[in-house]
Image (cartoon, rainbow, N blue to C red):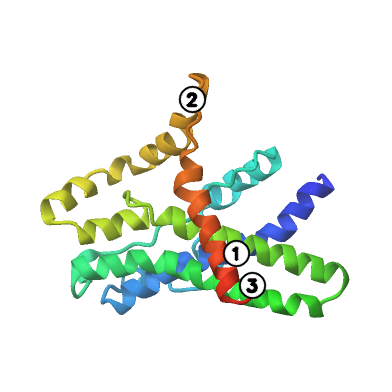
Protein backbone atom coordinates (compact mmCIF):
# COMPACT_ATOMS: atom_id res chain seq x y z
CA UNK A 1 0.00 0.00 0.00
CA UNK A 2 1.22 3.50 -0.86
CA UNK A 3 2.87 5.32 2.07
CA UNK A 4 0.71 8.38 1.44
CA UNK A 5 -2.43 6.27 1.85
CA UNK A 6 -1.07 4.75 5.07
CA UNK A 7 -0.29 8.24 6.34
CA UNK A 8 -3.80 9.41 5.52
CA UNK A 9 -5.37 6.44 7.30
CA UNK A 10 -3.11 7.00 10.34
CA UNK A 11 -4.41 10.53 10.94
CA UNK A 12 -8.04 9.89 9.95
CA UNK A 13 -8.89 6.49 11.47
CA UNK A 14 -9.26 7.67 15.08
CA UNK A 15 -11.25 10.84 14.27
CA UNK A 16 -13.66 8.91 12.04
CA UNK A 17 -14.22 6.10 14.56
CA UNK A 18 -14.72 8.50 17.48
CA UNK A 19 -17.01 10.83 15.53
CA UNK A 20 -19.27 8.01 14.35
CA UNK A 21 -19.27 6.10 17.64
CA UNK A 22 -20.09 9.07 19.85
CA UNK A 23 -22.66 10.42 17.38
CA UNK A 24 -24.62 7.16 17.31
CA UNK A 25 -24.14 6.39 21.02
CA UNK A 26 -25.45 9.88 21.84
CA UNK A 27 -28.66 9.12 19.93
CA UNK A 28 -29.00 5.85 21.84
CA UNK A 29 -28.38 7.41 25.25
CA UNK A 30 -30.81 10.26 24.55
CA UNK A 31 -33.51 7.79 23.50
CA UNK A 32 -32.96 5.70 26.63
CA UNK A 33 -33.05 8.75 28.91
CA UNK A 34 -36.28 9.84 27.21
CA UNK A 35 -37.91 6.49 27.95
CA UNK A 36 -37.18 4.26 24.93
CA UNK A 37 -35.14 1.13 25.80
CA UNK A 38 -34.94 -0.16 22.19
CA UNK A 39 -31.37 0.97 21.51
CA UNK A 40 -30.24 -0.21 24.95
CA UNK A 41 -31.71 -3.64 24.31
CA UNK A 42 -29.64 -3.83 21.12
CA UNK A 43 -26.48 -2.74 22.97
CA UNK A 44 -26.26 0.56 21.10
CA UNK A 45 -25.45 2.55 24.25
CA UNK A 46 -21.98 1.07 23.88
CA UNK A 47 -18.95 3.19 22.97
CA UNK A 48 -17.48 0.20 21.15
CA UNK A 49 -17.20 1.29 17.48
CA UNK A 50 -18.04 -2.22 16.27
CA UNK A 51 -21.59 -1.80 17.60
CA UNK A 52 -22.18 1.19 15.32
CA UNK A 53 -20.10 0.48 12.21
CA UNK A 54 -21.76 -0.28 8.91
CA UNK A 55 -19.20 -2.31 6.88
CA UNK A 56 -20.09 -0.56 3.64
CA UNK A 57 -20.93 2.96 4.81
CA UNK A 58 -18.31 3.30 7.56
CA UNK A 59 -15.38 1.40 6.04
CA UNK A 60 -15.67 0.55 2.33
CA UNK A 61 -17.09 3.79 0.91
CA UNK A 62 -14.83 6.19 2.92
CA UNK A 63 -11.76 4.01 2.20
CA UNK A 64 -12.46 4.05 -1.54
CA UNK A 65 -12.90 7.83 -1.49
CA UNK A 66 -9.66 8.33 0.46
CA UNK A 67 -7.68 6.06 -1.87
CA UNK A 68 -9.17 7.73 -4.94
CA UNK A 69 -7.76 11.07 -3.81
CA UNK A 70 -11.08 12.73 -4.62
CA UNK A 71 -10.82 15.05 -1.62
CA UNK A 72 -14.37 14.08 -0.66
CA UNK A 73 -15.36 12.02 2.37
CA UNK A 74 -18.80 10.45 2.63
CA UNK A 75 -20.23 7.57 4.62
CA UNK A 76 -22.75 6.42 7.20
CA UNK A 77 -23.17 4.24 10.28
CA UNK A 78 -25.87 1.82 11.39
CA UNK A 79 -28.94 3.87 12.36
CA UNK A 80 -29.95 3.79 16.01
CA UNK A 81 -33.41 2.20 16.45
CA UNK A 82 -35.93 4.45 18.18
CA UNK A 83 -39.53 3.52 19.02
CA UNK A 84 -41.32 6.85 19.36
CA UNK A 85 -44.22 5.18 21.20
CA UNK A 86 -41.91 4.60 24.16
CA UNK A 87 -40.82 8.23 24.42
CA UNK A 88 -42.39 10.20 27.28
CA UNK A 89 -43.21 13.23 25.12
CA UNK A 90 -42.74 11.85 21.57
CA UNK A 91 -42.60 15.12 19.62
CA UNK A 92 -40.21 16.85 22.02
CA UNK A 93 -38.13 13.80 22.84
CA UNK A 94 -37.58 12.86 19.19
CA UNK A 95 -36.09 16.32 18.69
CA UNK A 96 -33.76 15.74 21.64
CA UNK A 97 -32.75 12.31 20.36
CA UNK A 98 -32.02 13.72 16.90
CA UNK A 99 -30.05 16.71 18.21
CA UNK A 100 -27.95 14.54 20.53
CA UNK A 101 -25.80 13.20 17.67
CA UNK A 102 -24.63 16.55 16.26
CA UNK A 103 -24.26 17.85 19.84
CA UNK A 104 -21.85 14.98 20.57
CA UNK A 105 -19.82 15.91 17.49
CA UNK A 106 -19.62 19.52 18.69
CA UNK A 107 -18.35 18.35 22.09
CA UNK A 108 -15.65 16.20 20.46
CA UNK A 109 -14.59 19.14 18.29
CA UNK A 110 -14.37 21.41 21.35
CA UNK A 111 -12.31 18.86 23.30
CA UNK A 112 -10.04 18.36 20.27
CA UNK A 113 -9.36 22.10 20.12
CA UNK A 114 -8.47 22.13 23.81
CA UNK A 115 -6.15 19.12 23.36
CA UNK A 116 -4.14 21.11 20.82
CA UNK A 117 -2.64 22.92 23.82
CA UNK A 118 -0.90 19.64 24.75
CA UNK A 119 0.69 19.10 21.31
CA UNK A 120 3.77 21.32 21.95
CA UNK A 121 4.70 18.97 24.81
CA UNK A 122 4.88 16.02 22.40
CA UNK A 123 8.01 15.49 20.35
CA UNK A 124 8.88 14.05 16.97
CA UNK A 125 6.47 11.93 14.96
CA UNK A 126 4.04 11.60 17.88
CA UNK A 127 3.60 15.35 18.00
CA UNK A 128 3.09 15.58 14.24
CA UNK A 129 0.57 12.72 14.32
CA UNK A 130 -1.32 14.22 17.28
CA UNK A 131 -1.47 17.65 15.63
CA UNK A 132 -2.83 16.33 12.33
CA UNK A 133 -5.23 13.92 14.04
CA UNK A 134 -6.68 16.65 16.26
CA UNK A 135 -7.10 19.07 13.36
CA UNK A 136 -8.85 16.33 11.38
CA UNK A 137 -11.05 15.57 14.39
CA UNK A 138 -12.07 19.22 14.67
CA UNK A 139 -12.91 19.57 10.99
CA UNK A 140 -14.66 16.20 10.66
CA UNK A 141 -16.86 16.64 13.72
CA UNK A 142 -17.89 20.17 12.80
CA UNK A 143 -18.69 19.07 9.25
CA UNK A 144 -20.73 16.12 10.54
CA UNK A 145 -22.65 18.39 12.91
CA UNK A 146 -23.40 20.95 10.20
CA UNK A 147 -24.34 18.34 7.58
CA UNK A 148 -26.57 16.37 9.94
CA UNK A 149 -28.45 19.49 11.01
CA UNK A 150 -29.62 20.25 7.47
CA UNK A 151 -33.44 20.24 7.87
CA UNK A 152 -34.15 17.27 5.62
CA UNK A 153 -35.21 13.81 6.83
CA UNK A 154 -33.64 11.37 7.49
CA UNK A 155 -30.89 13.75 8.64
CA UNK A 156 -31.02 14.79 12.29
CA UNK A 157 -31.91 18.36 11.36
CA UNK A 158 -34.90 17.06 9.44
CA UNK A 159 -36.18 15.25 12.52
CA UNK A 160 -35.71 18.39 14.60
CA UNK A 161 -37.59 20.39 11.97
CA UNK A 162 -40.45 17.85 11.99
CA UNK A 163 -40.75 18.36 15.74
CA UNK A 164 -40.81 22.15 15.43
CA UNK A 165 -43.19 22.59 12.49
CA UNK A 166 -46.99 22.73 12.73
CA UNK A 167 -48.59 19.30 12.28
CA UNK A 168 -49.56 19.65 8.61
CA UNK A 169 -46.13 20.88 7.49
CA UNK A 170 -44.43 18.34 9.75
CA UNK A 171 -46.30 15.46 8.10
CA UNK A 172 -45.32 16.70 4.64
CA UNK A 173 -41.65 17.03 5.59
CA UNK A 174 -41.63 13.66 7.34
CA UNK A 175 -43.04 12.01 4.20
CA UNK A 176 -39.78 12.86 2.41
CA UNK A 177 -37.77 10.58 4.69
CA UNK A 178 -38.06 7.51 2.45
CA UNK A 179 -36.56 9.54 -0.40
CA UNK A 180 -34.13 11.43 1.84
CA UNK A 181 -30.95 9.64 0.80
CA UNK A 182 -31.73 10.15 -2.89
CA UNK A 183 -32.57 13.81 -2.28
CA UNK A 184 -29.26 14.34 -0.47
CA UNK A 185 -27.35 12.70 -3.34
CA UNK A 186 -29.27 14.82 -5.81
CA UNK A 187 -28.63 18.09 -4.00
CA UNK A 188 -24.95 17.61 -3.27
CA UNK A 189 -23.75 15.49 -6.20
CA UNK A 190 -26.17 15.31 -9.14
CA UNK A 191 -27.28 18.96 -9.30
CA UNK A 192 -23.74 20.44 -9.12
CA UNK A 193 -22.58 17.92 -11.74
CA UNK A 194 -25.41 18.78 -14.13
CA UNK A 195 -24.88 22.49 -13.51
CA UNK A 196 -21.17 22.14 -14.28
CA UNK A 197 -21.95 20.48 -17.61
CA UNK A 198 -24.21 23.42 -18.40
CA UNK A 199 -21.41 25.83 -17.55
CA UNK A 200 -22.99 26.92 -14.27
CA UNK A 201 -21.05 27.01 -11.00
CA UNK A 202 -23.33 25.64 -8.28
CA UNK A 203 -21.31 25.01 -5.07
CA UNK A 204 -24.20 23.75 -2.93
CA UNK A 205 -21.92 21.85 -0.54
CA UNK A 206 -19.83 24.98 -0.09
CA UNK A 207 -22.88 27.07 0.76
CA UNK A 208 -24.58 24.60 3.08
CA UNK A 209 -21.63 22.75 4.64
CA UNK A 210 -18.09 24.04 4.04
CA UNK A 211 -18.65 27.75 4.72
CA UNK A 212 -20.80 27.27 7.86
CA UNK A 213 -18.35 24.62 9.09
CA UNK A 214 -15.40 26.93 8.48
CA UNK A 215 -17.09 29.71 10.46
CA UNK A 216 -17.78 27.34 13.35
CA UNK A 217 -14.18 26.06 13.36
CA UNK A 218 -12.88 29.63 13.49
CA UNK A 219 -15.33 30.43 16.29
CA UNK A 220 -14.13 27.42 18.29
CA UNK A 221 -10.51 28.46 17.88
CA UNK A 222 -11.36 32.03 18.90
CA UNK A 223 -13.36 30.96 21.98
CA UNK A 224 -10.58 28.65 23.17
CA UNK A 225 -7.88 31.28 22.70
CA UNK A 226 -6.16 29.83 19.65
CA UNK A 227 -7.10 32.91 17.63
CA UNK A 228 -6.56 36.31 19.11
Identify the residue at image location x=66%, y=77%.
115
Q: Which label is found at residue 146?
A: none
SS for dot 3: loop
Which quarter shows the N terminus?
top right
Which quarter shows the C terminus?
bottom right
Closer mark to the observer between disc 2 and disc 3: 3
SS for dot 1: helix
Name the spot of residue 215 as percent of width and height, x first: 52, 59
Identify the mark nearer the N-term, 1 or 3.
1
| Nearer to the camera, 28 or 136 | 136
* Mark 1 Cα shell of 10 Å, populated few (<14), some (14-19), many (≥20): many
- Does 88 appear above or below 155? below
* Mark 2 Cα shell of 10 Å, populated few (<14), some (14-19), many (≥20): few
Q: Which label is found at residue 138?
A: 1
User: Is residue 76 at least partly visible in the picture?
Assistant: no
Identify the residue at image location x=26%, y=43%.
176
SS for dot 2: loop
Name the spot of residue 48 as percent of width and height, x first: 55, 70
| Contact check, label 1 and label 3, Cβ < 8 Å | no
Measure the alpha-carbon separation of dots 2 and 3: 38 Å
Identify the residue at image location x=22%, y=72%.
87
Name the spot of residue 222 as percent of width and height, x first: 58, 71
- Does 115 appear above or below 27? below
| Contact check, label 2 and label 3, Cβ < 8 Å | no
- Does 145 appear above or below 86? above
Left or right of 197, for residue 84: left
Closer mark to the observer between disc 2 and disc 1: 2
Mark 3 — residue? 228
* Mark 3 Cα shell of 10 Å, populated few (<14), some (14-19), many (≥20): few
Mark 2 — residue? 200
Amino acid sequence: MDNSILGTVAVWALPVLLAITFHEAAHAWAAWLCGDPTAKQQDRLSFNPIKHIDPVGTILVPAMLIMSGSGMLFGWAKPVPVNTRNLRVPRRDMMLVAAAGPAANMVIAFVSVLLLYAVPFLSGDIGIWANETLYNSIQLNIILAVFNMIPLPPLDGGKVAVGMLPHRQAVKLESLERFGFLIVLGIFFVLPSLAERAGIYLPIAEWLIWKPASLMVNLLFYVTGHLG
